[in-house]
Image: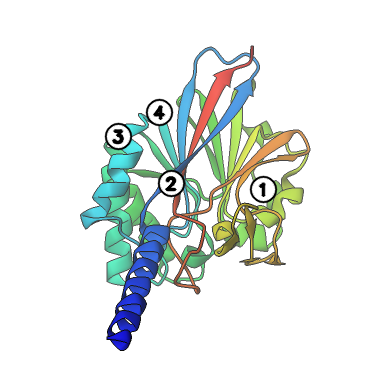
Amino acid sequence: MLYFWIGLGICLGLAILAVFLWCQNNVISKTCCIYEKDGADREITLVHLSDLHGKSFGKDNCKLVKEVSALNPDIIAITGDIIHKYTPKDKRVALRLVSELSALCPVVYVAGNHEMRNKGYRFFRRDLKEAGAVVLDDCAQDICGLTLVGLNCASQKNGKINKITPQQTVAGRLKILLAHKPHLCENYKGLGYDLILSGHAHGGQWRIPFTNQGIFAPGQGMFPKLTSGMHTVGESKLIISRGLGNSQCPVRLFNRPEIVLVKIVPKK
């Protein structure tokens, strides 16, 4: 009888652990960042997504689309690594999601390192455009009264930080840079951007409870500083998404998938 209760306790413990890990990797959290802008004449709602890595939340990402739709966004920004491996499944998941999100509002996208390391990226970029995304690879676009600038990972890696600057865009508009890697943020300092949106760090993948401290992030190593939330970089604000999917490490811990809601409001 004793062995029965021991076995039952072990099974119950494993079941609780399995449910916990499933929730950690599949139950989406939402984080709200408020940015006050001088001269803004209305509130703009921007949803920031990053690092999907081919993951699907429900059939055709229906759960993710529902969560985003409930936020009533004016614009959706995707900051790279929407695919993990260049497979038909990854492409299909990514393109279906972009198509569904584009039906809600304008979607802008910039490539991450997982897209740029694939030789077929130029074809995937074409497919993204056909699915409805505005692909910002080293270019700018004025949407919803905002100037969106995208710097892809190849340009970041090759040091072409100054290739696209706000000086090439409409004066007086809020200027937002989409750049996948947050640890290069010092290179963006002084370029005149109001907001910088990044991902890549996956929130540190495993986070120490109650501290918001991540364990490891690519490009930053152990106990990285730039994994989530809003940070000040010169006169700019850097907003980092913890991302939605997983890369080399298949499990998140104390670090649920994240949608970042950015509220751009008139400064009082």
- Say if mark 3 contacts mark 1, CB within 8 Å: no
Mark toward the start of the polypeptide (1 vs 4): 4
Mark toward the start of the polypeptide (2 vs 3): 2
Compute the Cα span from label 4 to label 3: 8 Å
The N terminus: image quadrant: bottom left
Report the residue that reaches farthest toward the front: 1
Mark toward the start of the polypeptide (4 vs 3): 4
Q: Residue 74 carries which label?
A: 4
- Per the image, label 1 sits on a secondary structure element best described as helix
Q: Residue 104 carries which label?
A: 3
Kind of residue indicated by mark 4: Asp
Mark toward the start of the polypeptide (3 vs 1): 3
- Say if mark 4 contacts mark 3, CB within 8 Å: no
Give the image location of residue 220, x and y in percent.
70, 64
The residue at 76%/49% (across/down) is 186
Kind of residue indicated by mark 2: Ser
Kind of residue indicated by mark 1: Lys
The residue at 78%/38% (across/down) is 234
Label 1 crowding class (10 Å Cα cut-off): few <14, some 14-19, many 20+?
few
Give the residue pinned by disc 2. 29
Q: Which mark is residue 163?
A: 1
Mark toward the start of the polypeptide (2 vs 1): 2
Q: In this view, does 165 lie to the left or right of 124?
A: right
- Per the image, label 3 sits on a secondary structure element best described as loop
The residue at 50%/73% (across/down) is 249
Q: Which of marks 2 and 1 is in front?
A: 2
